[in-house]
Image (tube, rainbow, N blue to C red):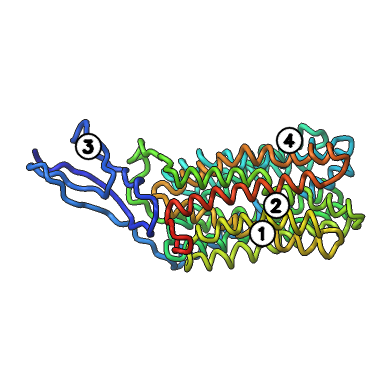
Amino acid sequence: MSVVDIEKFSQKPPAGSFDSGYECSRLPSLQNATQPTSPVRSISESGTVELLTYEHQYSDGGLKANLTVLGAFIALFCTFGLLNAFGTFQAWYTTHQLQHMSPSTISWIGSLQLWVFFFSGWPIGRVFDSYGPTCLMVAGTLCYLVSILATSFSVHYYQYVLSQGILFGLSVGLLFYPSLASISTHFLKYRATAIGIAVAGSGLGGVVYPIVLQHLFETVGFGWGVRISGLASLAGCVASTLTVKSAPSPTQPGSCPNLKILPDARFSLLSGGSCLAALGFFIPFFYIVDYARHLSISEHTSFYVLAVLNAGGVLGRIAPAALSDTIGCFNLLAPSAFLCGLSCLILWFVTAKSLATLMLFAAIYGFFSGAFISLVNPCVAQISHIRQIGTRIGMLYSMLSFPSLLGSPAAGALLSRGHGSFDGLIIFSGSTIIAGSLLILVAKLLIEPRLFARV
């Protein structure tokens, strides 16, 4: 039996990382062969197997890699930053064009944004793994433009659902996933730091957009306010599309059409914990402005509470991510989620009864929520092969779409059921996040049973 041409690529995984993803091989002349579960080998006439691997080289820096981080930062500023500012829209709709509707009904617009954004992750990830980021980001930029213009001219509830809820959510996904997945193809040693810097763009956008939008709404009106901010952001989307590039793939697009993503227990627990946390995770972003008004804080000042929440997220996205490159991503992910939930149950539920204490909660929750957001992707990348990163991140976010869709309307229903009391809403948010953090901790212990080992 002659030597068969087997093409295989592999990477050296970090300690405790996923190793069953090394199955993508091409066997053009060998039929009925099983895919190997270890790094690949050539098959000789005697039937012996010899190791033959291709190792992906990470640049961990350089012009192309650094421009990708910059482009991703801009993309997330313009997209996820505006998504983080939905509390501004929620509060405006409640007192203006949709004032005849309940907060729970209005929150479906923001929840649909999250659902479409998260659910689109899996198909977008598959396309990215085969074709790279550019075509996806061009489509995302066009969707962004159409959604902003359509939202600015909307009058009826269903129009906001279609333009802001569905189309804008899709545009965020088309720009978000390729940007972050591209970073993972350039960086290994400093992956979490690079992703943290990029994700900080969403936090900074969450600081800028509430203040800018509120000012524009009050001075030029809702329609022109949305158009001015959206068209300015469009320039950022174009810039990010031109600068975000993925590292060359070890195989050509389509060479692995049967690539299988088989979640092991670690990935399943990480996904399950993230889904539980997602039920309550976005509730503060949607309702903290309404809560500030509940405390009789002026309408103008209440929007700054959301800005402070997102400002805390800027630091939270960078500092823990940089630290995780030293002590491990999983070692920080579970504590960050736990402290998010704990801050809701203690700082928000018990102490946030004035502007000062509410600002304190917003800053602390923003910090730990930012850490959680920036650390999820590096954790997925750590337990995935390079050719699986886009698909696996997309798979996780697609699963997150359903709890994200239901969480905020459920909180709105609790608010209505409590006749304006926020107690049930806050307890629901904090308890679900804490429950999710415990599942993530189990995933970490499954990778490495020693509690303080680097994972």
* Disc 3 target residue: 28
Q: Nearer the viewer, mark 4 or mark 1?
A: 1
Residue at mark 4: 161
Q: What residue does disc 2 label?
A: 84
Q: Rounded to the nearest whole Å, what is the CA distance between mark 2 and mark 1? A: 8 Å
Quadrant where the C terminus is found in the figure: bottom left
Amino acid at the residue labelled 2: Asn
**Residue drawn at the location 64% of the way across and 66% of the way down:** 315
- In front of the other: 434 or 218: 434
Residue 304 showing in the rendered view: no
Which residue occupies the foreground of this view, 424 or 377? Answer: 424
Q: CA distance from mark 4 to mark 3?
A: 49 Å
Q: What quarter of the picture does the N terminus occupy? A: top left
Q: Which numbered circle lies on residue 112?
A: none
Q: What residue does disc 1 label?
A: 203
Chain-order first, disc 3 or disc 2: 3
Question: Earlier along the polypeptide chain: callout 1 or callout 3?
Answer: 3
- The location of residue 240, given as percent across then percent down, is 57, 56
Amino acid of disc 4: Val
Taking the view exactly as shown, the residue that stands out farthest to the front is 450
Q: Residue at x 51, y 40 (%)?
A: 122
List x then y, in percent, for residue 208: 74, 60
The reply to whether discs 2 and 1 touch (Cβ–Cβ < 8 Å) is yes
In the figure, residue 453 lies in which quadrant?
bottom left
How many other residues sit within 10 Å of disc 3, few (<14), some (14-19) or many (≥20)? few
Three-letter code, disc 3: Pro
Q: Nearer the viewer, residue 261 or 330?
A: 330
Label 2 close to label 4 by CB (< 8 Å)? no
Disc 4 on helix, strand or loop? helix
